[in-house]
Amino acid sequence: VTLYGVFTNHSCMGVATRCLLLELLDVSVSELLQGHSMWLVQHCARDILEALAFLHREGYVHADLKPRNILWSADDECFKLIDFGLSFKEGNQDVKYIQTDGYRAPEAELQNSLAQAGVEVEGDSGCTAAVDLWSLGIILLEMFSGIKLKDTLRSQEWKDNSAAIIDHIFASNSLVCPAIPVYHLRDLIKSMLLNNPKQRCTAETALLSPFFSIPFAPHIEDLVLLPSPVLRLLNLIDDSHLHNEDEYEDILEDMKEECQKYGSVVSLLIPKENPGKGQVFVEYANSSDSKEAQRLLTGRTFDGKFVVATFYPLSAYKRGYLYQTVQ
């Protein structure tokens, strides 16, 4: 997350509060936990691993990865990491209790218990960057399965054989996903969830997983949930409108005029052939305008048809790549 500045707020009672001014982000992964497309899991995994690789190279441990601390940036089209309140320099841990229950690595669980009992932890024996990989492994497993794993992680079965539980989760969900990408994701998550922190993969090695070399298409639900400056309007244009040049130009003008009511339109595209045939792509100057347009256009009727408005990845739109989205 981008830090724009720091300032001190003085209340009328004379209390001074230090404030951080951060960029405004959109939905968090906690709002998206419902069993995700591989496109979304891959997108989140890559973005957060890149963030962790940077942090860990600089010697810092985030120490509080959880779904609420991963947010979508509509303007940068990526997931970002927030909340560094428990972060510390590796080898110089200055916070006793780290990580949130349900995403806490085994070594952090032990350290927190020792701290609670008043036992001092030596500097070299403190937690390392490996705790972040554990947390991300749990998050990705929850994203893939659509279930919260807090109770599972407390079970004796998990402590005895976590690998078997991971295998079971993937076997239960593999029917709706292609087998090879599922196996790559499973193996990536397993490498993050090894009990011995020294055996866990690093963020940099995780980014080399073959899981990231496989192209996926987003589900339509993904494009509804993740804001971007581009809107895609469905259920509007008949084939007959596309092959009459005069009608086609009139529709372009009408759509542009309508869409400009909600914000500044940079470009508008209605493909005449597949992929994207008959869909309306509207690029706004910023994601705030496109979010307002999506809110106001969804459910509207044009020529007796209900409008379906989803967002669309700006990067794909800019390079002329129109997904055949999975319904």
Image: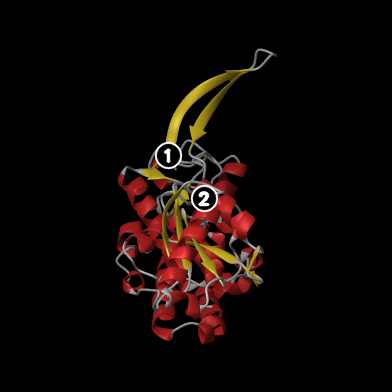
Q: Give the mark toward the camera: 2 or 1.
A: 2
- Residue drawn at (38%, 43%) of the image: 60
Mark 2 lies on a secondary structure that is loop
Q: In this orientation, which residue lies closer to the viewer: 185 or 241?
A: 241
Label 2 crowd (10 A; few <14 / some 14-19 / many >=20): some
Q: In this orientation, which residue lies closer to the viewer: 38 or 199?
A: 38
How far across and how far down the image is residue 260, in percent? 52, 50
How far across and how far down the image is residue 89, in percent? 39, 39
Residue 202 showing in the rendered view = no
Residue corresponding to mark 1: 2
Which corner quadrant holds the N terminus?
Answer: top left
Instruction: Locate residue 18: give its quadrant.
Output: top right
Mark 1 lies on a secondary structure that is loop
Q: Compare marks 2 and 1 and give the one earlier in the sequence.
A: 1
How far across and how far down the image is residue 208, in percent? 29, 66
Q: Say what amino acid the circle numbered 1 marks.
A: Thr
- Residue drawn at (53%, 71%) of the image: 220
Scheme of image coloration: secondary structure
How far across and how far down the image is residue 72, in percent? 50, 53
Q: Say what amino acid the circle numbered 2 marks.
A: Gln
Residue corresponding to mark 2: 260
Label 1 crowd (10 A; few <14 / some 14-19 / many >=20): few
Q: In this orientation, which residue lies closer to the viewer: 134 or 247?
A: 247
Indicate which disc residue 184 carries: none
- On screen, residue 12 versus residue 283, left or right, reads right
